[in-house]
Amino acid sequence: MYLIEWQAWELVIDQTHSTGTKNSKTPSLPLVYESDEARDVQAAQQKASDKPRIRGPVYTLSNHILEVRAGASEDKRGLISMLSAMALSLISIGAIATAHYASELIFSIADTGRSVAPDILFLAMFFFALTSCYAAAYLKYGLKITRLEMFTSRHLLVRFNRLTGQVHLHRPSYCGGVVTLPWHGITSSAAPGGNGGALTLSLFWSSQTTKMLYPEIVWIGKVSTNPHEIQAEWEFIRRFMDEGPEGLPRPRITSHFPWPWQAFTPQFEGLSHYFRHSSQIIKLGLVLISPAFLIIGLGHWLSLLLCWKPRWPKIIREAGLPGKPIPPLTTLADRPPHIQERLRENAHLWAIRPGQRPAKKPRATRRRAKPGNQSTTVKESSTDETHRADRPQT
């Protein structure tokens, strides 16, 4: 579920980008100029749809607060949970077997009338060593993967506060943590001239806007194959922040309680439009693989049950209320010292170049001569040289 967010944060703080060695693999990022940034910010302020509508899930909607679900791979949630459940089951079975044979060994030692059975001693040591190896490997390598879906916050959240003009991102600490960003300076994939082919609405803040030496990106809501739905969703958010909730359709409010249908419906997000316009063979194939979606849905529900409801800091919960302070924007100083050092060393990767993007130079077309023409040209040039040599010099 948090795999993409985790990889994005690891890319930002990756130490290999700042080592300066020849073996370091610096990502080839596109060059961004101030003119590009200004154009995208201006496009995000324009009208994107005539029918604003947010598909959700929406957790809070008031006069000044809009809180929606975020996450780039919510519809894929469940696979990591199933694999983690299998690994934890093996460790649990090994621990139970170790405890069983260890108890028999203790009872045999306590009973002075019986001798220690070699087979029980061997099985107790075997299961203890095997379970210890499994548990050590899982704690070192597997637990951080499991925490992308289990034993963590149940959802990634985005809270829009129109009174303070701020956007709050709620993420685990290993994905960047809770940050507060300005509304002005935001860019969107659904803005006019944006990436209309995206499957999910994405919001972006450049390194120049965040003042944290790196950009921020968040994916909003459900997956869709219809660009008009994504544009309508962005228009709903834009109008809410710029004009208020008046005139906007009232969305359905979703509960934070992990109901089973919240785990199974995301597996089919984005398929309804595709299913209606596909051929009969494609529809039959989707029906045949539907049991796989149900299995992933079970893992999705398991991950929801083993996670906890995300909770905002008090200053963000009270932001916009009368007499309450406005949360400060997240800055570089809010990060731990070792993270600040990494961000400073990698700041050149996300820096915006001043001025406008230079105009592209026209390519010089070179026509390759045909083989027949080439021989003729060689003959003509040799004839011209012969005539020049025969001419008397003055």
Image (spheres, grey):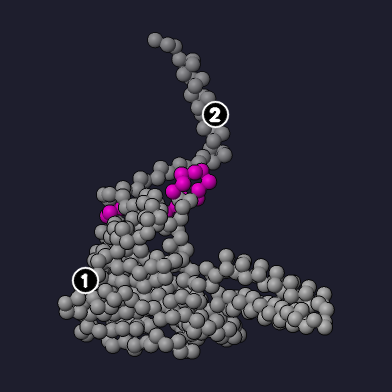
Residue 194 location (% of width, % of height): 34, 66
Q: What is the distance, in whole Å, between disc 2 and disc 1 at their CAs? A: 84 Å
Seen at 82% across and 83% down, the residue is 113
The kind of residue tagged 2 is: Lys
Q: Which residues are magenta?
A: 18-35
Residue 187 included in the magenta stretch of the image: no
Q: Which comes sooner in the sequence, label 2 or label 1?
A: 1
Examine the rendered structure and indicate whether residue 342 appears above or below residue 312.
above
Look at mark 1 in the image and give the residue it sits on: 326
Quick one: label 2, few (<14), some, or many (20+) residues within 10 Å? few
Residue 33 included in the magenta stretch of the image: yes
Residue 319 location (% of width, % of height): 23, 76
Q: Nearer the viewer, mark 2 or mark 1?
A: 1
Please say whether residue 4 is visible from this viewpoint.
yes
Task: Give the SS element for disc 2.
Answer: helix
Q: Nearer the viewer, residue 46 or 250?
A: 250
Relative horizontal placement of residue 355, taking residue 106 as reference (left or right): left
Task: Give the SS element for disc 1.
Answer: loop
> Taken as a whole, is the magenta stretch helix, strand or loop?
loop
Quick one: label 1, few (<14), some, or many (20+) residues within 10 Å? some
Examine the rendered structure and indicate whether residue 364 appears above or below residue 247.
above
Seen at 46% across and 71% down, the residue is 2
Residue 42 location (% of width, % of height): 24, 64
The kind of residue tagged 1 is: Ile
Relative horizontal placement of residue 386, taking residue 97 as reference (left or right): left
Which quadrant of the figure contains the C terminus? top left
Q: Nearer the viewer, residue 59 or 251?
A: 59
Seen at 29% across and 66% down, the residue is 181
Residue 82 occupies which quadrant of the picture? bottom right
Residue 293 location (% of width, % of height): 55, 83
Look at mark 2 in the image and give the residue it sits on: 379
